[in-house]
Image (cartoon, helix red, strand yellow):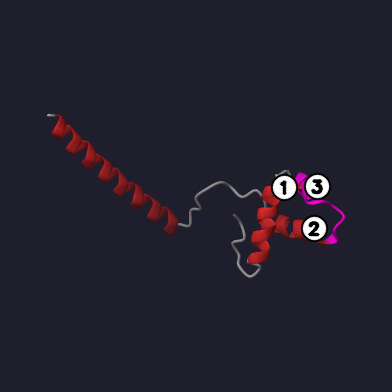
Amino acid sequence: MIGVLSIIAEFETDLRAERQAEGIKSALERGVRFGAKWKMTKKQVEEAVSLQQIGEMTNQQIADSFGIGRSTLLRYLSNYKKSLSSSDIYC
């Protein structure tokens, strides 16, 4: 009896995994983006780059002005500099 129940449970798990994979594929085709929301827009990143180049503010001050952490700012700046030609510069 327990063997039959475990087979049914395994079958349900496989079905759930298939439905999930289909749902993810469908969402990606519709352009859904998974993950956390972006903390900064492209325009804000460009503004942060210009503030950093001016050199009057520290990275911490720039991050504080955008309401994000310093490490988040540095990650955005690094990704921006790596992919200036790409439209998807976010983490």
Q: Which residue is mark 1?
A: 70
Of label 3 and label 1, which has the lower sequence position? 3
Q: Work out whether residue 41 can be spotted.
A: no
Q: Quadrant of residue 76?
A: bottom right
Left or right relative to 79: residue 13: left
What's the distance in space between the residues labelled 3 and 1, CA to CA?
8 Å
Q: Which residues are magenta?
A: 54-65
Secondary structure at badge 3 equals: helix
Vertical arrangement, residue 67 with respect to residue 85, above or below: above
Q: Determine the residue positioned at 38% across, 55% down.
A: 25
What's the distance in space between the residues labelled 2 and 3, CA to CA?
10 Å
Residue 61: numbered disc: 3
State yes or no: discs 3 and 1 in contact (Cβ < 8 Å): no
Of label 1 and label 2, which has the lower sequence position? 2
Q: Residue furthest bottom?
A: 85
Of label 2 and label 3, which has the lower sequence position? 2
What is the quadrant of the N terminus in the image? top left
Inspect the image, locate mark 1, and give the three-letter code of the amino acid beneath it.
Arg
